[in-house]
Amino acid sequence: MSYITGPEVVSYACTCGLIKPLPKLYFCRHCSQIRCSFCVCSEVDSIFCGKCSENIPSAEATMKKNRCANCLICPSCQQELSTRIASKGPANPTDAKSPIKKTYYLSCYFCRWNSRDVGIPDQPSATGGWPQRDNVHSHRLQDVVDSYKQIMLSQKHKKEHDKKKKIGKFVSYTDRTGVTASALRKKIGIPDTPHALLKKPKMPEPAVASNDVDELPEHLITTPLNLMDITTVEQRLLQPESQPLTVDKLFPVRKQLSIKKSLRCRCCERNVSKPEFNPSSVKFKIQLFAYFHIPEVRIVSLSPLVEGVPSELILKFTNPTQHQTTITLLNLDLAEQENYVKELTVSEVAECLEHSLSLQSKQPGSLTSISVGSGSQPSSLLSLTPRQPSITVKPRKIEQHVNCDVEMPEGAFVLPPRDDAAEYDESSDVHNVEHDPKHVVWRKSNKAFIKLLVVPNANLQANQDVVCGFSMEHIYTNILVATMENKQPQKSHHRVRIFFNLGKITRE
């Protein structure tokens, strides 16, 4: 039986041709198409800390290296640290009325690590102020970062200068090149300074290898090795600036920030998923999962599979929408998708060629008007270069091999709308829906059990997976297209391809 969190027994074909289970698909109500994770683009809505639930601006998150300034995690097990209170003796022991001073330290409730184990002193307040280990290579890293920033700035200025520079028959030296200003400084007697665009960025001092290596400590040879005192690879990578070798040098680490992202359809650029801005809220403003719009299909029972012998397959169809739908089962045609991909490829090549020819006809110059010695490329040849690829995911051929035939039922069957109270109300089972008793085994509320006959291919081997599929066409009711003139929701026929992994072939 296929559940939401179970094995991927029942899979749906996305519009782009990929095969995904229903909980991993989205449904764009504006395009009326199924979208997978590759057919949507993500964008960050908010950055927050998962412990203190504080929203942090992107600029501040970048400055703090995507770490929270208040929350800390355990360097040993990566769990969140808690602040504990410890009592200290009174300031004046001779005075009986002297208050007891409280101090605070960090402790992990999971692995029992605390800040006292590494020598971090207790703090007088619980709000923070915990000391952090300084990076001995911070100055070196800062020099490297500053040099790369100067290189980027220099390249940016150079590109802007090249755009503004005018190429003519007679080149005129202006103040933009710095020649006039340099000649004027020499004439007056002021020392010449290079132009800002001509300044080379200051590179950091290169690292020099040295043969002077410290000798190994004697205790590494004489003292037995205790693996409990040695840090693991995960613990060292959590603190890459110091990479402590022993557990007594582990310092608390700032908690990494989390994000909330929204998903947009690549075709119409409408949101298919958008969470709430509040970090403590788990609700969504927009939640267009395919599970809420496409009828769900599950495997209820299946007789043993024998090659060339019909087996009985019972499927459960569930209508998740608030509108009645009619489902028609059709034979699976994978050649239709393949032909569509080929036609789309030919049309894109023709469109690109037409666009190139239109640009070529608009160019005033010709090949003869351009000198051969110049390094510039003719504009007509530039127009023949391919366009930049679109962000829209192009459909592809469905790479799914089917080795089992399915006998489709004649006609269609109706599924009533979803009713949450019908699960506990026996009187709501009657919907006056006529169906074929040969194929509809049982129905209740918005569910129906359909019986099909599957015939595995005769050339299948033992312990080989049997995969079958069919096309399901259902009526989708779109309530977004209702206008002032037409207040009725629009109904359309939507078709989706479904594949089933029925299991292994068994021998009689």
Image (tube, grey):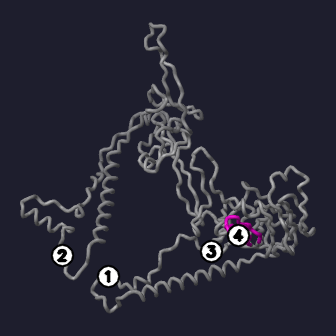
> Is residue 233 visible from the viewing direction of this image?
no
Q: Nearer the viewer, mark 3 or mark 2?
A: 2
Image quadrant occupied by the C terminus = bottom right
Pointer 2 residue: 172
Q: Which of disc 4 and disc 2 is earlier in sequence?
A: 2
Check disc 1 and report its element: helix, strand or loop: loop
Of callouts 4 and 1, the N-terminal one: 1
Which tag, 3 or 2, sits closer to the chain's start? 2
Query: Marks 2 and 1, Cα distance to the nearest angstrom?
Result: 21 Å
> Would you call the spot at circle 4 few (<14 residues within 10 Å), some (14-19), or many (20 or more)?
few
Instruction: Determine which residue is flagged by label 1.
Output: 376
Q: Secondary structure at mark 2?
A: loop
Choose between 182 and 340: the one closer to the eye. Answer: 182
Q: Amino acid at mark 4?
A: Asn
Q: Residue furthest front?
A: 485
Q: Nearer the viewer's eye, disc 4 or disc 1? A: 4
Callout 4 secondary element: loop
Q: Provide residue 421's location: percent of width, then percent of height.
A: 83, 51
| Relative vertical location of residue 195 with respect to residue 167 in this rendering, above or below | above
Under mark 3, the amino acid is Arg
| 186 inside magenta stretch | no
Residue at 35% of width from left, 42% of height from top?
Answer: 136
Q: Which residue is labeled 3 in the image?
A: 396
Circle 3 SS class = loop
Stretch in magenta: 472-492
* Left-right relation of 166 to 119: left
Across and down, in percent, residue 370 comes to: 31, 88
Residue type for callout 2: Ser
User: Which residue is painted at 62% across and 82% down in the image?
Assistant: 342
Disc with the residue nearer the chain's start (4 vs 3) = 3
